[in-house]
Image (cartoon, rainbow, N blue to C red):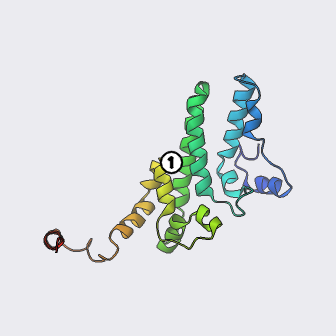
Amino acid sequence: MAAHHNDHDIIKLLIKRGATPIAVSSYQTENHTIQRCIGKLNVYKAMASEAYMCVIETETETKPDPFQRAFELCHKLRAESSKEYEFREEYLELAAKCEQFSADLLGQTRDSIELKTVLSHDSQMSKRGVGKESRPMKVLYAVQRQHKKFVVHPHCQQQLIELWYRGLENWRDSSWIRNVVISTVIILAFPY
C-alpha cells in the first residue's frame, strides 16, 4: 500500500525492517482466476511506484538504479499486456508511467557532467569490474527497450549531439556554407 501511494519514507522504513513485496511468481499457481490477475496487477502497480523504484535494492545490486529498474519493469509490463489481455490497458498504462518516470528522472540532472555520468553508467559493467567507458550505455539500453520518451528527452539529445560532434567544436556554430565546403573536401580527400 505504501508503494501504491508513493510514500517514500514508509517504503524505506519497511525495507529497512526486512519487508519484501509479494513475488509476482506467487500468483502463477492458479491459472486465469480473477484473484490471480488482480493480485498480479496490484503487485506490478506497487513495483511501478516511483518511490519504490528509487529505494528498492535487489540481491545483485547494493545501490538502486532507478533507470535500469524502470527500463526492465516497462519491458515486463509490455510483455504482460500481451499475456493478460483482459488488463492490457492497465499494464500499458503502467509501462507508460515507468517510461515517463525515467524521462522525468533524466530531466532532474543539473549539469552536463552529471548527465554524462548518468547516461554512461552501466550497472552490468560495474559489477564485472570493467573500466569506465564514455559510451552512453543507458541510451543504448533505452533504445533496445524502446523507451522513446527517454531517448528523445532534450537532455539525452544534447548529450548525443555532443558525442556526435566531438572533435568538431565549432561545427554547429559555423555557417552552412563553411560546413558544405569542409564536408566536400573531406569526401574528396577520403580515398587518399
Where, by quadrant of the figure, is residue 93 drawn?
Answer: top right
Which residue occupies the foreground of this view, 138 or 172? 138
Quick one: SS at disc 1?
loop
- The image quarter in which residue 26 lies: top right
Q: Work out whether 109 lies above or below 149.
A: below
Residue 55 position, x and y percent, is 71, 57
- Local packing at callout 1 (Cα closer than 10 Å; few below 14, some 14-19, many 20+) is few
Q: Residue 1: where, in percent of width, then height?
A: 76, 42
Q: Kindly give the residue lying farthest to the right in the view shown.
A: 17
Whether residue 87 is situated above or below residue 62 in the rendered picture: above
Residue type (three-letter) at the residue carrying disc 1: Arg
> In the picture provided, is 64 more to the left or to the right than 79?
right
- Tell me if 67 is positioned left or right of 46 in this view: left
> Residue 13, percent across and down?
82, 56
| In the image: residue 35, left or right of residue 114 | right
Left or right of 36: which side holds 183? left
Residue 52 location (% of width, % of height): 70, 51
Q: Which residue appears farthest toward the front when viewing the image?
A: 192
* Total numbered badges shown on the rendered structure: 1
Q: Quadrant of the C terminus?
A: bottom left
Which residue is located at x 57 percent, y 36 percent? 79
* Rendered residue at 72%/22% (across/down): 33
Residue 120, relative to residue 145: is it above or below?
Answer: below
Give the residue number, with chain letter if any, for mark 1: 145
Question: In the rendered image, which quarter is residue 102 located in?
Answer: bottom right
